[in-house]
Amino acid sequence: MLSPLPSLLVEQSVRAALLEDLGRGGDITTDAVVPATARARCALVARDPGTLAGLDFCRAAFSLIAPGIGFTAQREDGARLAPGDVIALVEGPARAVLTAERVALNFLGHLSGIATATRGIADAIAHTRARITCTRKTTPGLRFAEKYAVRAGGGANHRFGLDDAILIKDNHIAMAGGVAAALELARRAAGHLVKIEIEVDDLEQLDEALRHGPDAVLLDNMNPPMLREAVRRIGGRAVAEASGRINADTAPAIAESGVDLISAGWITHSTKVLDIGLDF
């Protein structure tokens, strides 16, 4: 089951987006053209196939403009969509509907695009034990929402910030003086609940890392044969995570190597928006 996000987090982001859009004078186009007494009934409709995410953001955009507006969801986050599927019905003051429309669709299309991209990879590796996971390559201020969309698409979340876990990457290794030194320093600093992961570029680095007991190893830009050997050497002593050049075409061979996780930054920072329209 996909747990909903706290309403306080959702409202905070949507309120900021609405304030940005309303500017200093509000929706002067709608106020000039649409009668104050006019009411509207409309549907949010999928134009392309995909996976839905962001319904609560969409609902909040309308309700923050007009608290009494009607919003009836016809699908749930995580649902697969076909072109023409009705996602939700909206009914209320026409001015409010039009004013909230763009912010509502921005959130819904963006988050559904992330869920759709994630689902594409999750489906491609469903025959393996591996899971697709996101990274910290997210839109500033929207990390919690984009990581939620990854979960809606059947993926898993990596750390949410720099304080979640220790992830030692190549530049850390260079500054610390090597793999062993970096892991020893990290172990001294980590609390008893803090996991330690280290990025390795080759099997020699992997062997050195394993001698110091990391909780997880990030196998960076390794081809499937090398990944299989890396998984063999890890032997279940650490979580094996593959990274680099991951898409729906390359993911199956990478997942079949036996890794536990496949991480991809593009699913949050470079996905295509899912086309969703508001039909009156």
Image (cartoon, rainbow, N blue to C red):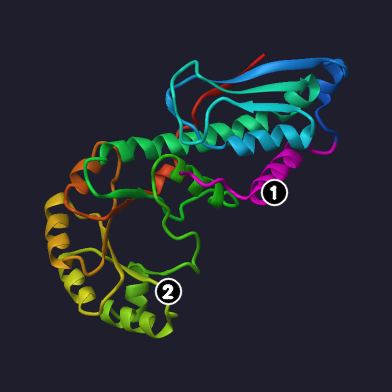
| Tag of residue 54 | none
- For disc 2, the neighbor class at 10 Å (few under 14, some 14 to 19, many from 20) is some
| Tag of residue 194 | 2
Q: Nearer the viewer, residue 129 or 256?
A: 129
Specify whether residue 156 is painted magenta.
no
Specify whether residue 22 is painted magenta.
yes
Q: Where residue 122 sits in the image (x, y, percent)?
A: 32, 40
The stretch in magenta equals 1-24
Which quadrant of the structure image shows residue 68? top right
- For disc 1, the neighbor class at 10 Å (few under 14, some 14 to 19, many from 20) is few
Is 191 left or right of 198, judged from the image as shown? right
Q: Main SS of the magenta segment?
A: helix
Q: Which residue is found at the position 73% from the left and 43% from the top?
A: 15
Q: Which residue is found at the position 45% from the left and 21% from the top?
A: 48
Label 1: state its secondary structure: helix
- Answer above or below: position of 278 versus 171: above
Question: Which mark is first along the chain, 1 or 2?
Answer: 1
Q: Please, what is the three-letter code of the amino acid marked with disc 2? A: Val
Q: Which residue is found at the position 35% from the left and 80% from the top?
A: 176
The residue wearing badge 1 is: 12
Q: Where residue 190 sits in the image (x, y, percent)?
A: 42, 80
- For marks 2 and 1, give the CA distance: 29 Å
Q: Please, what is the three-letter code of the amino acid marked with disc 1? A: Gln
Check if mark 2's residue and mark 1's residue have beta carbons within 8 Å. no
- Answer above or below: position of 141 versus 238: above
Q: Where residue 14 sits in the image (x, y, percent)?
A: 68, 42
Q: Dividing the image into 4 quarters, which one contains the C terminus?
A: top right
Is 274 left or right of 205, judged from the image as shown? right
